[in-house]
Amino acid sequence: MLNKLIVAKNNMKKKSPLIEAAIRKLLPKVLDSISSISSSKIELTRRSIPKMVELVANEKYSYADQANVLFYPLQVLNKLHSDFDVWEKSWAIIKPRLNALKMSSPQSSIVVFYVLSLIFRNDCSQICHLVDYLASQYQEETVHVKNTILVLLEIMERLDSPIIRTYFKENRVRHRLLLDSELEITLQYLPDFTNSELNHFLQEKSFSEEQFSILVDKLSNLEETSISSESFWRSLLEKMNEKMMNFIEKQLKLLINRQERKSLSLRIEQIFKRMKEMNIEDTTCILRISTILLNLSDSQYQLLPQNATMSLVSLLIQVFCTSYETKAPEINQLFNKFHSKINKTSIDSRKEPIEVIEDICEEIKCKSIQGPLDFHFLKKANELKPELASRRERNVVVSSILFEKLASGLQSLGDRDGKLQYCVIVTIIDSYVNKLTKEELIPNYQVFQKVCERAMEGFAMYEAKWNWLFIAKKISTIFVAAKRYPELLKKLIRIVNKNKDLHAKLTSSNKEYSQMEQSINN
């Protein structure tokens, strides 16, 4: 429609050989003049864009001198073109001169403005040639010149012309240039990117430590932007400092609010994987991620992937085993928050972590909490230096609870490789009991008693497929240690006798066990 109007308007213009001849002489002189006079230059910034749009569209100048010095020749040209049909002749003169212009020259911006103003008033379809020229100049220029070109393109985008706006909407030239720009340029325009453009930029680019930190700051201000670039997320999780965790929290909340389950599941999986890779003593990230997840409302928490709760169990138990001496208040709070998530009927909102772990194990047994069991961290936690008696004791207590409640499930994952978690847990218990066997006086008998009882409850789940050679030795260690305590020995034997297969296996293969059983019965 606009093209038809322009054609109709041009048809109404007067034809004059005299004016055509004048244009052929005047236009080159004007372009040469503004290209060579040192005062013919303007500094462009994004703040100046509204004024520059007005300048091009309506010839509104911010002060009179600007009109007289810089744009009077343009006003003359625009007047001639509005009255006479000379545009085709003018464009034939403009185009080769435009292609020869270097954007690095100080006067280039004013020349481009002249050309833009003439195109806007005479034939908007020629905007593609001006844009192609600017794009061809962009890659080899300095940051300052690139910024100037981007401002010029944004001015064009804002002009009130359906043809020009459609062209920029379909081609998104400025954004394509930005994707290949230096970070200091791109950061200024991040809010203008579509989500796909931004993620393409993040995926394709690599950043230094300093650049990445600045980038995260800028992205944090884009409240509704979901980052899906895998390379960006890898860098984010690798660095994992306070700033990165703040950003991760915002991203998770955005995915939850949008109920983007697939993306949320992927990010949660990546976060938990990263937590497991970190130094076992680095509890800051674990505490922060756990806090983020446990602060979700119940409806939000339900959007997390099914395995998230089990992964959170592993992290909470890990941080309890490794860092309770220094982080007790925070860990207690997290365990109670977790308990309220899994047990809505519980009246007691304040429980010790050990009590919560017992409840967790019960929930796992009845499959209220689903997902792969993962307690490999216990071996590392038990070997941490410096050795702390409280920590080693806590680790064995946790191990005994897990074994008492979950021995069958752990055994199903394998029991013939010492690195498997079933073997790790049993070995932790065995080492503890074996060490106390050599002690004249057990320092904390109640803990020792509970560990032995829980361990035997785990062994009482025995099935024929279990690795008998492995567990027979471990059961023997417990009975040897318990011989000094008749009441404990009686209880352990009663636990074993609940499993007829285990009892038969012990009595047929272990004479010492048969003797202990007889001595108690007598």
Image (cartoon, rainbow, N blue to C red):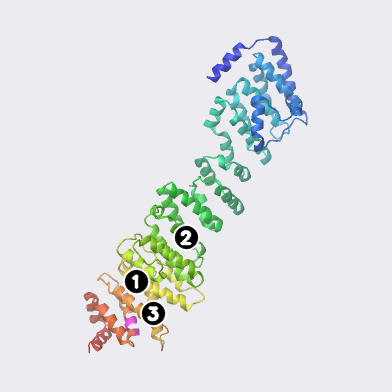
Local packing at callout 2 (Cα closer than 10 Å; few below 14, some 14-19, many 20+) is some
Location of residue 379 with respect to 245 vertically, above or below: below
Residue range in magenta is 476-481
Q: Main secondary structure of the magenta part?
A: helix
Q: Nearer the viewer, residue 113 or 450?
A: 450
Observer-side mark, 1 or 3, equals: 3
Side of 251 where 112 appears, left or right: right
Dot label at residue 372: none
CA gap between label 1 and label 3 equals: 15 Å
> Do labels 3 and 2 touch, CB within 8 Å?
no
* The C terminus lies in quadrant: bottom left
Residue 44 visible in this rendered orientation of the protein: yes
Return the disc, 1 or 3, that comes first in the chain's sequence.
1
Residue 95 visible in this rendered orientation of the protein: no
Location of residue 386 with respect to 158 vertically, above or below: below
SS class, disc 3: helix
Circle 1 residue? 403
Local packing at callout 1 (Cα closer than 10 Å; few below 14, some 14-19, many 20+) is many
Circle 3 residue? 447
**For residue 178, which quarter of the picture?**
top right
Return the disc, 1 or 2, that comes first in the chain's sequence.
2
Mark 1 is on which residue type? Phe
Circle 2 residue? 291
SS class, disc 1: helix
